Structures are given as C-alpha cells and as structure tokens.
C-alpha cells in the first residue's frame, strides 16, 4: 500500500495518532522499499546481462553499435542484490579491521571509497552496469581508472562511450569532476537514466537512516546519524547531475 494513501485512510478512521512518528516501510512510488534496497525478486533479462527489460534492450542496442565500431562491450557487473553487497561489505570490513588492523571508522571510510553500504547500491536497481572492452588483453584488475585513460587498454572505448552512451540512455554516474564528493571517479559505471532517475527519486523519499538501523551486517553498529547523512549527501546524491 502506498504510504500517502495509508496515512489518509488511517486519519479517516481515526488511527493516525496511534501511528509511530516515522513510518518508512512504504515508498510513495511504484517501487517497493525491498526493490529499492535490492531485497526483492525482480525480473531480470539477458543471460549474463541481468538488467530490467528496458535497460537490457537499450544495452543490446548499445552493444551492437559499439561492436560495429570495433569494441566488444563486456559486462563486469550489473544487478547485485542486497545479500551479495552485504557479503562484499563484510569481506572488506574484515580484511581492513582484522588483517590490516584499521579502526572500524577508518575501515568504513576506506570501504566507501568504492563500495556501497548494503541497501544503498545503484546496482540493486537492475539499471546500472560496470563495463569494459573485451578485446584488449589486460592483466590484473580491470576496473581501474588508469586503464580507461590515455595510454590505457580501454582509452579508445572510453572515448566511444563519451560520444555514444547517452544516445542509448546510459549515463556515467561517478564523474571525473574535482569538486564532486562521495565515490571516486568510476569510468566504467553507467546507469540507464530512464529508469534509474525515477528509482532515485523514489529512493530519496525513503527514510534511509531508519531503514539501515534495522540491518545487522558487520560494522553497521558504528554508523552514526551524522555519518549516514553525509554518506547520503555525498555518495548517493553527489553524482552526475543529469541523473538527479
Ligand atoms: Zn558499479
């Protein structure tokens, strides 16, 4: 049930005063809270692609166009559910705190240079992709900014994306602007704007602070409301302006 309707209905029947002051479990939009947090079983399309239908179709068109221009778009990561993000988070948290001996808050700051807090990833939406060119031979990690810069194996591919991705609805999320805060520059991460913009709008209406208080993954007991407010402002909202 939509929250606005619920409150309206509740007040008609005289129940409004018995409601808790914060009521975060419904979103006002067509996307459920579980869906926005990567906990819903959504329908995904394309073997090894795993995107929402419209995003998948646009991706196929972009892939075809890139292929004609000599690039073989390879999906490194697309849909990722809450539990997968939780596993990534906890693995990094343990590595930084136990192996590297960092303090919890230091470890959390280090994790959020590139990884999201579970429940806050754009990869939960089935609209966002991490891509590379499958043609060049590459050693080591592929999702490294230098590999997309001049002299790197994906430099020409990046120029092609700059020129063409938006024609297919795909926009760079974490841009290379010096004043941008939050996640670092990710030349590989694109988002299918026609769906991700309304999803972000719905997501912003949630009480994310409150929702994260229900979670129990490692390290979350160190989140303060100040930390989370900054995280939301910088990591979730300080992105390519075209995606807001
Ligand atoms: Zn990504």
Image (cartoon, helix red, strand yellow):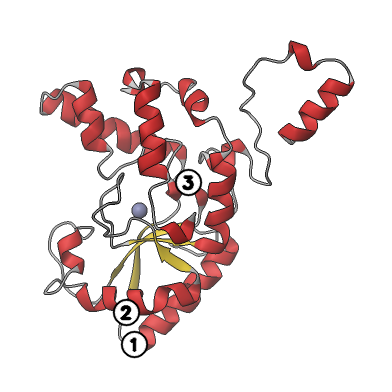
Residue at the top extreme? 18
Q: Earlier in the sequence, mark 3 or mark 2?
A: 3
- Between the residue at mark 3 and the residue at mark 1, the CA separation in whole angstroms equals 30 Å
Q: Secondary structure at mark 1?
A: loop
Q: Which mark is residue 160?
A: 2
The local secondary structure at tag 3 comes to helix
Q: Looking at the image, do the residues carrying marks 1 and 2 touch, with CB atoms under 8 Å apart?
A: yes
Q: Which residue does the image show at 39% across and 29% down from the upper left?
A: 228
Q: Which residue is at a point 31% across and 44% down the rendered structure image?
A: 182
Can see residue 119?
yes
Q: Residues within 10 Å of mark 3 (few under 14, many from 20)?
A: many
Q: Position of residue 188 (x, y in %)?
A: 30, 62
Residue that lies at the very extreme toward the front in this rendered image:
179
In this rendering, which labeled residue sits more in front, label 3 or label 2? 2
Q: Residue at x 26, y 55 (%)?
A: 185
Question: For residue 11, which quarter of the picture?
Answer: top right
Q: Which residue is mark 1?
A: 69
- Which quarter of the picture shows residue 52? bottom right
Disc assigned to residue 124: 3
Is 87 situated above or below 174?
A: above
Q: Is residue 61 left or right of residue 40?
A: left
Q: Would residue 41 be seen by someone viewing this image from the given angle?
A: no
Crowd band around label 2 with a 10 angstrom C-alpha radius: few (<14), some (14–19), many (20+): some
User: Where 178 falls versus 110 (above or below)?
Assistant: below
Q: CA distance from mark 3 to mark 2?
A: 26 Å
Residue 148 is tagged as: none
The residue at label 1 has a CB less than 8 Å from ligand 1: no
């Amino acid at each position: 049930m939509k929250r606005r309707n619920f409150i309206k209905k509740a007040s008609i029947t005289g129940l409004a005063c018995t409601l808790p002051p914060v009521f975060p479990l419904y979103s006002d939009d067509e996307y459920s809270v579980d869906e926005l947090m990567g906990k819903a079983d959504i329908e995904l399309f394309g073997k090894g692609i795993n995107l929402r239908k419209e995003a998948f179709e646009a991706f196929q068109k972009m892939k075809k166009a890139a292929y004609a221009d000599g690039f073989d778009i390879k999906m490194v990561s697309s849909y990722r559910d809450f539990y997968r993000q939780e596993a990534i988070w906890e693995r990094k948290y343990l590595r930084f705190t136990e192996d590297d001996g960092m303090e919890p808050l230091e470890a959390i700051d280090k994790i959020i240079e590139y990884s999201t807090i579970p429940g806050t990833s754009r990869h939960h939406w089935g609209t966002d992709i991490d891509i590379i060119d499958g043609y060049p031979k590459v050693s080591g990690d592929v999702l490294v900014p230098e590999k997309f810069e001049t002299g790197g194996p994906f430099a020409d591919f990046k120029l092609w994306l700059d020129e063409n991705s938006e024609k297919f609805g795909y926009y760079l999320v974490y841009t290379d602007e010096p004043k941008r805060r939050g996640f670092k520059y990710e030349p590989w991460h694109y988002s299918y704007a026609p769906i991700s913009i309304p999803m972000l709008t719905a997501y912003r209406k949630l009480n994310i602070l409150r929702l994260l208080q229900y979670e129990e993954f490692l390290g979350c007991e160190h989140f303060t409301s100040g930390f989370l407010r900054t995280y939301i402002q910088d990591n979730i909202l300080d992105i390519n302006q075209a995606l807001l």
